[in-house]
Image (cartoon, coloured by chain):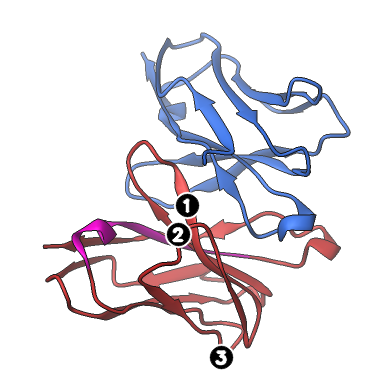
Chain colours: A red, B blue
Amino acid sequence: NAGVTQTPKFQVLKTGQSMTLQCAQDMNHEYMSWYRQDPGMGLRLIHYSVGAGITDQGEVPNGYNVSRSTTEDFPLRLLSAAPSQTSVYFCASSGSPGTGGREQYFGPGTRLTVT
Amino acid sequence: QQQVKQSPQSLIVQKGGISIINCAYENTAFDYFPWYQQFPGKGPALLIAIRPDVSEKKEGRFTISFNKSAKQFSLHIMDSQPGDSATYFCAASGLDQGAQKLVFGQGTRLTINP
C-alpha cells in the first residue's frame, strides 16, 4: 500500500493564481481531511469529508474548495492564491470511528509559497 | 481560539534523560487524545493515543499520562535517544463534534543531545 500520497511536493504561485493540490489514499478509508501547518500554530483543519459526495468545513476553510467524487481522491483547490496561504498542506485519511478507526494517516505534505 | 495548548515550544534533553511535553484542553467533549511525531520534511505519524477512561498508557519508552479533572495530558519519553529528535504534537477530538476534526497543539521541537 502506498498509503496517502500528495502531489506536488513543492509549488510556487503568484498572488491571484489558482491551483489544485492532489491527495489520494489506497486504504479504502471513508474519512479524509486537509490540514495546513504554520510555525507555532500546529496543524489546522481546512476541510474534511466523511465519504464520497460529502464534505464539510473545518477551522480555516476560507479561500479553499474541496470535492469528493471517489473514495480514493480528495483534491484541495485554491481559488485565488494569497500570500497568507503560504504554508505546508497535509492530507490525512482514517477509517470509520465505529470500527475503532480514529488514527489519521498523513501524507508527506505539499509546501506552497505564494508570492 | 486555541482549544489545545501545548508546552514547551522547544525542549533540549540529554541522551538517556526523560522528555516531558504537556498539553491542556478546554472541551470536555473530547474523547480521544493522540500524540503525533513529525520528522523534518515528513508528515505527522501517530505515536501513541489515549482515551479518557484510563489515566496512563505506555508503549515502549513512550507514556501518556492523563488527568481528566485537570483537563491535562502529557507525553513522557524515557531514556530519550537522538533518534527521538523531532517535533511532537498533541491533539484531541470528540465523536460528537466529528471524529475527524482533530484539534492540534502548537507543537514542541524536541532535541536530544548525544
Secondary structure at badge 3 equals: loop
Toward the front, the furthest residue is B1
Q: Amino acid at mark 1?
A: Arg
Above or below residue A29? Residue A58 is above
Residue at x 69%, y 48% (from the top left corner)? B93
Q: Which residue extends farthest right?
A: B53
Work out whether B106 lies above or below B14: below
Q: Which mark is residue A74?
A: none
Residue at (58% x, 21% y) in the render: B22
Q: Secondary structure at mark 1?
A: strand
Residue B20 in percent (x, y) is at 56, 16
| Label 2 vs 1, first from the N-terminus | 1
* Residue on which disc 3 sits: A69
- Residue A14, placed above or below residue A79: above
Q: Position of residue A64 (x, y in %)?
A: 39, 73
Residues marked 2 and 1, same chain: yes
1 or 3: mark nearer the eye: 1
Is B77 in the magenta?
no
Check contact, mark 2 vs mark 1: CB within 8 A. yes
Image location of residue A11, percent across then percent down: 20, 68
The residue stretch that appears in magenta: A82-93
Residue on which the image places disc 1: A44
- In the rendered image, is residue B63 in sight? no
Letter of the chain that mark 3 sits on in the rendering: A
Q: Which mark is residue A60?
A: 2
Q: Residue at x 45, y 59 (%)?
A: A60
